[in-house]
């Protein structure tokens, strides 16, 4: 989800016939941010996970670009975007995205974020509610207690040495504007894991409908995803006159945290249905 170390990169190539994405840079808060644009239609912003980049998001980007205009963004220190002498925090990253949207003359969009990107999308929707139509948040928790105990126990032992000499460092260096800056970047990312995390009040004041997605063996617990969904107004019986909530919950079977983004077929189906505001028809419901 968010404060998670991505220990596996998904680098599948796009299998869908698409126009080649257009890559460019824009200035935002003292750094050059890299982004790619592909497809046509209603806009959707795609935000990657920790230590990842646009290619690591795999096939979900070209799939979304079949019917939408996709803006895939690389966050501070990730991919081809600059790292700067500034702590990496979710509010700061969200403000970067908001400013980039202004630079791109993009007043409002749907947002799909995975892991760290889901937390950034969440804070974008909280801090800049006028900019987010609908939020898709894959592997997101709103408080530390919603994370698996094994992950919580691992955080205090994190160090840059854990990543040095690994594929994560190699992939980072391959795209980074400053290939020698990995240790500084890793230290900022580890500091992010220690940031206070209690966003319950923010959940309760969210304006945008949210699609929560998690694997059934994710870094967030299933109990937390259900609690999250209930805070968003979900979890009630949908027949017998009860309207369906705007927010939704999808649990992917046999799926760990790092496997979530590789489930592009399942992801696309639930994301596309949500963004189109389509709902399956129940026996006691009108078709929507």
Image (tube, rainbow, N blue to C red):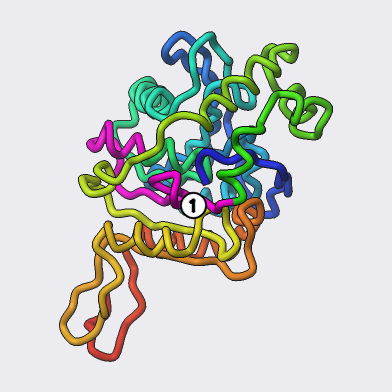
> Does 104 appear above or below 63?
above
Q: Position of residue 1 (x, y in %)?
A: 52, 47
Residue at horizontal 53 percent and vertical 22 percent from the top: 76
Q: Is residue 236 left or right of residue 180?
A: left
Based on the picture, tell me whether residue 86 belongs to the magenta stretch.
Answer: no
93 or 199, which is in the foreground? 199
Residue at horizontal 37 percent and vertical 41 percent from the top: 122
Give, as a single range, the part of the protein colored magenta.
123-149
Q: Position of residue 234 (x, y in %)?
A: 28, 66
Can residue 206 be seen by looking at this rendering?
A: yes
Q: Residues within 10 Å of mark 1 (few under 14, many from 20)?
A: many
Image quarter of residue 246: bottom left
Which quarter of the figure is the C terminus placed in?
bottom left
Q: Position of residue 189 (x, y in %)?
A: 58, 26
Q: Position of residue 4 (x, y in %)?
A: 58, 41
Q: Which residue is mark 1?
A: 138
Total marks placed: 1
Which element carries disc 1, helix, strand or loop? Answer: strand
Image quarter of residue 224: bottom left
Residue at horizontal 46 percent and vertical 8 percent from the top: 30
Furthest-bottom residue in view?
283
Based on the picture, tell me whether residue 140 belongs to the magenta stretch.
Answer: yes
Can residue 104 be seen by looking at this rendering?
A: no
Q: Is residue 71 left or right of residue 55?
A: left
107 or 239, which is in the foreground? 239
């Amino acid at each position: 989800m968010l404060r998670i170390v991505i220990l596996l990169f998904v680098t599948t190539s796009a299998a869908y016939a698409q126009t080649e994405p257009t890559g460019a840079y824009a200035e935002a808060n003292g750094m050059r941010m890299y982004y790619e644009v592909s497809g046509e239609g209603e806009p959707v912003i795609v935000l990657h996970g920790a230590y990842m980049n646009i290619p690591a998001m795999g096939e979900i980007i070209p799939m979304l670009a079949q019917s939408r205009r996709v803006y895939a963004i690389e966050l501070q220190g990730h991919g081809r975007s600059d790292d700067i002498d500034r702590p990496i925090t979710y509010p700061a990253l969200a403000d970067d995205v908001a400013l980039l949207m202004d630079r791109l003359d993009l007043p409002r969009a749907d947002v799909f974020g995975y892991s760290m990107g889901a937390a950034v999308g969440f804070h974008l929707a909280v801090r800049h509610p006028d900019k987010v139509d609908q939020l898709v948040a894959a592997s997101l928790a709103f408080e530390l207690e919603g994370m698996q105990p094994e992950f919580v126990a691992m955080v205090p032992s994190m160090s840059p040495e854990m990543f040095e000499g690994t594929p994560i460092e190699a992939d980072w260096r391959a795209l980074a504007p400053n290939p020698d800056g990995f240790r500084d970047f890793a230290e900022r990312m580890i500091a992010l894991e220690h940031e206070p995390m209690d966003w319950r009040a923010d959940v309760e004041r969210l304006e945008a409908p949210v699609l929560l997605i998690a694997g059934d063996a994710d870094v967030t617990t299933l109990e937390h995803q259900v609690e999250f969904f209930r805070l968003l107004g979900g979890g009630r019986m949908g027949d017998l006159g009860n309207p369906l909530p705007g927010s939704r919950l999808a649990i992917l079977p046999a799926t760990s945290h790092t496997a979530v983004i590789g489930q592009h077929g399942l992801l696309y189906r639930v994301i596309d249905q949500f963004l189109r505001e389509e709902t399956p028809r129940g026996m006691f419901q009108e078709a929507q």
